[in-house]
Amino acid sequence: MTLAYAPRGLVGLLTPQGNTTVEPECAVLWPQGVGHLNARLVSQEATIEARLRHYYTKLNDDMAQFGSAPVQVVASTCTGASYLLGAQAEDELFAQLSARWQRPVTNSALASVAALRALGAQRIGLVSPYPAGLTQASQGYWASRGFEVAAVAVADGEDDGFHPIYSLGHAPAVRALQRLPQQGLDAVLLLGTGMPTLAAMVAHGRWGQAPVFSCLMATVWHVAAQLKVLGGQGADLLALLEHGPWRARWAGMAQELA
């Protein structure tokens, strides 16, 4: 089946309920001809940690939101839940979902792991928008995946009236990135799909010699490789980061928003 607005592939996204970043950034980042259908991860739990855990207890039910739409790959764009679930349970869950729905089902943390491995990265720097407890959990997660977390910088916002992550503007990720050391890193990962990251990736495509990319950028690359739209090698990721058409799209959007 060929879709008018997604002739090269339709992606199902499962996005946390209040996240205002995934959809606009994906609209910029997708390769030409790839589209997405978005569904929401919803929870009434009181704390961010409880909500994140709850999201992954009902992913199978949430997949039903896509109905009969011809989505070829599904990606949960929630990274925080991975840090609390742990690597082994995460691998088992997404293998089960892929088998159950007979299509690749992945998430932004797994995509970021694949991206870091494709780049041959070992020592990584993190830019985190999370509170201290979740930032610490994220460090444990990346270590469990075989990476050395060499440096961490926290992106601080100025307005927490809506959500401490989703209310961030473009500047906090840039400022936090600039606090990382420019030597001794193989890659810099901008955490959290709710933190706006396009401006940071344009301002600093590399920090020192280290490629800079977000978990959402990793998701786009990983999913596009599964759709056979992009290759899954590190060189393909670097080409997307440094020369992808998303840069021109973002420049036009930034000019309109200025």
Image (tube, rainbow, N blue to C red):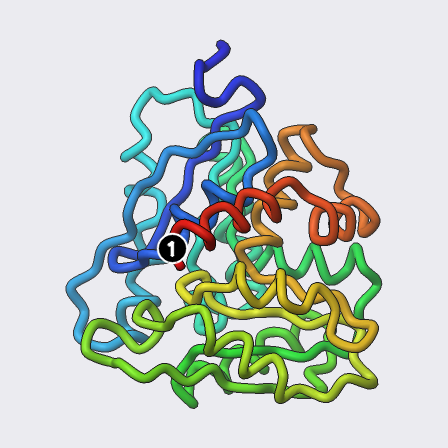
Asked if 98 appears above or below 41 in the picture, the reply is: above
Provide residue 94's location: percent of width, then percent of height.
Answer: 51, 48
Quadrant assignment, res 176: bottom right
Quadrant assignment, res 18: bottom left
Asked if 36 appears above or below 60 in the picture, the reply is: above
Left or right of 256 in this view: 88:
right
Q: Judge by depth and name the residue closer to the eye, 204 or 145.
A: 204
Q: Judge by depth and name the residue closer to the eye, 144 or 39.
A: 39
Total numbered circles? 1
Q: Residue at x 38, y 55 (%)?
A: 257
Q: Name the residue under label 1.
A: 257
Provide residue 88's location: percent of width, then percent of height.
Answer: 58, 64
Q: Which residue is drawn at 60% across and 44% down?
A: 248
Tell me the SS state at disc 1. Answer: helix
Q: Which residue is drawn at 75% across and 65% down?
A: 211
Q: Which residue is drawn at 32% across and 58% down?
A: 19
Looking at the rendered structure, the kind of residue marked 1 is Leu
Please rate how many residues cluster around mark 1, counting C-alpha atoms within 10 Å: few if below 14, some from 14 to 19, many from 20.
few
Q: If the image is split into quadrants, where does the C terminus sit?
A: bottom left
Left or right of 258 in this view: 96:
right
Left or right of 173 in this view: 45:
left
Farthest residue to the top: give it. 1
Left or right of 171 in this view: 29:
right
Provide residue 47's location: percent of width, then percent of height.
Answer: 23, 77
Provide residue 127's location: percent of width, then percent of height.
Answer: 56, 78
